[in-house]
């Protein structure tokens, strides 16, 4: 199974400590635009920079595959609600016939949703990778829940959709 | 206290920025500063409202119509879409 992951979701997966594990269940693809975004983030001195450096290391080791997508291939999809990184990911899905795009950005997901549906590409958030790791028996539901809760805190997503859904998930699974 | 901020932008946007600066008789920096202030303030307010309403919508305490009344149609559609893909992510994983 192949997935295309945007910059923000790569950092989320690395923050949750599951990006490495995800290679056991899927092939992770990014674009050169995402790689450039990671390099820029890595040049700062903060938590995101630390995560970006780890992702770039995985890229240099060949565990993440990067495909060059020219701007002309996706510029028609650019809008004020979606940046080049996310659009390049959608273009990569279309060009390489990959049917799963991982993005945590609500603006981007909505902006790209119609084209994605037309191209039969499913958009998921990074939680989908965790759920797949549970199915594969690599982590427990409890571990996954803790990781999501920590991510919500780290990304300042408290009080949003994800928090409601993770509470619901916990209740449904008697946690 | 102020801080210096530098960034890169495509040439065509810089050309439009310069055109706007000429028309408004303002400097390039003034235009960028104003745009950033307006965007950041508006976006942060919007995020807080979105978060609160999205939470209540996801909990089933707000209907889609009520969401539209608060956020407007496009923003409400965005929240509803994000809720759907987030629910699918929990329920289906990568399937």
Image (spheres, rainbow, N blue to C red):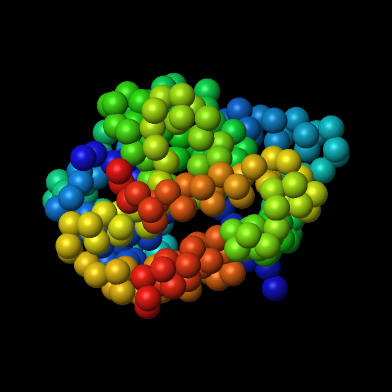
**Is residue A12 left or right of B36 when viewed as pictured?**
left
**Residue A99 place in picture, x, y as percent:** 32, 33
Foreground residue among A23 and A135: A135
**Is residue A175 left or right of B31 when viewed as pictured?**
left
Identify whether A20 is placed above or below A105. Answer: below
Residue B70 appears anywhere in the view:
yes
Identify whether B27 is placed above or below A22. Answer: above
Foreground residue among A170 and B23: A170
Identify whether A57 is placed above or below A46. Answer: above
**Is residue B35 left or right of A65 when viewed as pictured?**
right
Report the residue that reaches farthest toward the bottom.
A175
Quarter of the image for residue A52 reads: bottom left
**Residue B61 place in picture, x, y as percent:** 68, 62
Foreground residue among A134 and B14: A134
Task: Give me the residue at 75% from left, 30% from top.
Answer: B19
**Is residue B75 left or right of A164 when viewed as pictured?**
right
Residue A6 appears anywhere in the view:
no
Task: Give me the residue at 29% from left, 73% from top.
Answer: A143
Quarter of the image for residue A27 reads: top left
**Residue B74 place in picture, x, y as percent:** 69, 40
Q: Quadrant of the C terminus of chain A?
A: bottom left
**Residue A128 place in picture, x, y as percent:** 35, 53
Task: Give me the residue at 46% from left, 24% from top.
Answer: A118
Q: Tally the marks.
A: 0
Task: Give me the residue at 42% from left, 41% from top.
Answer: A123
Q: Quadrant of the N terminus of chain A?
A: top left
């Amino acid at each position: 199974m192949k997935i295309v992951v945007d910059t923000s979701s790569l950092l989320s997966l690395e923050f949750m400590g599951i990006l490495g594990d995800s290679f056991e269940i899927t092939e992770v693809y990014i674009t050169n635009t995402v790689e450039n975004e990671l390099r820029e983030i890595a040049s700062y001195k903060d938590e995101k920079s630390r995560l970006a450096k780890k992702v770039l290391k995985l890229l240099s080791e060949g565990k993440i595959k990067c495909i060059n997508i020219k701007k002309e291939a996706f510029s028609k999809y650019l809008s004020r609600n979606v940046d080049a990184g996310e659009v390049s990911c959608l273009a990569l899905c279309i060009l390489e016939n990959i049917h799963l795009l991982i993005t945590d950005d609500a603006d981007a997901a909505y902006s790209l949703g119609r084209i994605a549906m037309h191209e039969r590409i499913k958009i998921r958030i990074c939680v989908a990778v965790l759920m797949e790791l549970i199915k594969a028996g690599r982590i427990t539901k409890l571990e996954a829940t803790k990781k999501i809760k920590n991510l919500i805190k780290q990304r300042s997503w408290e009080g949003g959709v994800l928090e409601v859904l993770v509470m619901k998930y916990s209740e449904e699974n008697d946690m | 206290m102020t801080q210096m901020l530098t960034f890169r932008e495509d040439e065509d946007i810089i050309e439009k920025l310069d055109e706007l600066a000429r028309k408004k008789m303002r400097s390039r920096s003034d235009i960028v500063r104003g745009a950033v202030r307006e965007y950041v303030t508006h976006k942060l307010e919007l995020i807080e409202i979105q978060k609160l309403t999205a939470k209540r919508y996801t909990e089933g305490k707000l209907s889609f119509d009520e969401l539209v009344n608060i956020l407007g149609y496009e923003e409400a559609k965005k929240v509803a879409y994000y809720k759907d893909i987030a629910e699918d992510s929990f329920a289906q994983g990568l399937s």
